[in-house]
Image (cartoon, rainbow, N blue to C red):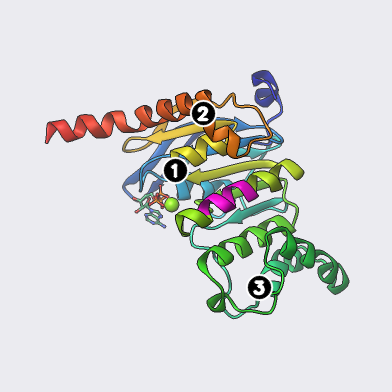
Amino acid sequence: MNNEEHLTKPRIAMAGAGKRFGKLQVFRDVEFAVGEREVLAIIGPSGCGKTTLLRCIDGLIPLTEGEITMEGSPITDPREGVAMVFQHFGLFPWKTVFDNIAYGLKLAGASRAQIEEKVPDYVKLVGLSGFEHYYPYQISGGMQQRCGLARALAVEPRVLLMDEPFGAVDAQTREILQFEMLRIWEARPTTMVFVTHAIDEAVLMGDRVLVLKGRPSTVHEIVEVDLPRPRDRGTLLLPRFAELREHVWSTLMKEAREAEFQV
Ligand SMILES: Nc1ncnc2c1ncn2[C@@H]1O[C@H](COP(=O)(O)OP(=O)(O)OP(=O)(O)O)[C@@H](O)[C@H]1O
Ligand SMILES: [Mg+2]
């Protein structure tokens, strides 16, 4: 999608967006647009407001300034077609893997027959076959993460929001999940906004990387990731990948290093 298109037909757009909790201004003047089939990665230091930003896009909490729109209409409440994968899985401990994945479908009014038909597809897609009747405490962290992903994907969202979707798993599982997610996205491209701490992950998965920084935080830069798709392990070996990673790294670290020298 070219620049002009995602400015005229954004699926999600934020303009002049700010959020305050009492006296704490978390972010301000946030502005971006994400098109259909576009992946926006948001990166920034801990506490800069990434989760808060996603919760605003999900309609869970209101902005204090500015506006968020989905296909042109303002987002004020959680809405159909938008699904979220939470930072700490957000699974229901008293529900099985199957029932956790079925949850969004149930909320959307799917019949038992539809649920019986659909859920197994998503169980398979994320590699949880055989564990449908386990409870979250009986499966590993990586499996819980995949369960959260399947729950969000099962409603076939038009907008998928992910908050550090692979943040709570070990390094190997993280790599596996990143490539699985890329494969899933290539099979069913949708609008995706995801938050990460990992520069590699942001560059590998994003069409653009939004760097959020400062106190209150603002959009420091939006980096265009001009790497070809489909992306896979080979992408990590491209010289362009290394250049982009370096660029995002220096953008993120510049102030941190300056602050260090002042101490
Ligand atoms: N409900 C709330 N009430 C008051 N302050 C809040 C609330 N939620 C978040 N904050 C504050 O907003 C700031 C940003 O928090 P947020 O969770 O969005 O950061 P983050 O960028 O997601 O951090 P991390 O990378 O550690 O997950 C923090 O200072 C936090 O204390
Ligand atoms: Mg967070």
Instruction: Name the residue: 60% across, 48% down.
Output: 161
What secondary structure is the stretch in magenta mostly built from? helix
Tell me, yes or no, whether the highlighted magenta stretch contains residue 254. Answer: no
| Residue 257, x across and y down, in percent | 23, 32
Query: How far apart, in angstroms, are the residues tagged by discs 2 and 1?
Result: 14 Å
Residue 198's mark?
1
| Residue 201, x across and y down, in percent | 51, 41
Q: Indicate the amino acid at tag 1.
A: Ala
Q: Quadrant of residue 150?
A: bottom right
Identify the mark nearer the N-term, 1 or 3.
3
Tell me, yes or no, whether the highlighted magenta stretch contains residue 179. Answer: yes
Q: Which residue is mark 2?
A: 241
Q: Residues within 10 Å of mark 1 (few under 14, many from 20)?
A: some
Instruction: Name the residue: 49% across, 27% down.
Output: 222
Q: Which residue is mark 3?
A: 97
> Pointers 3 and 2 in contact (CB under 8 A)?
no
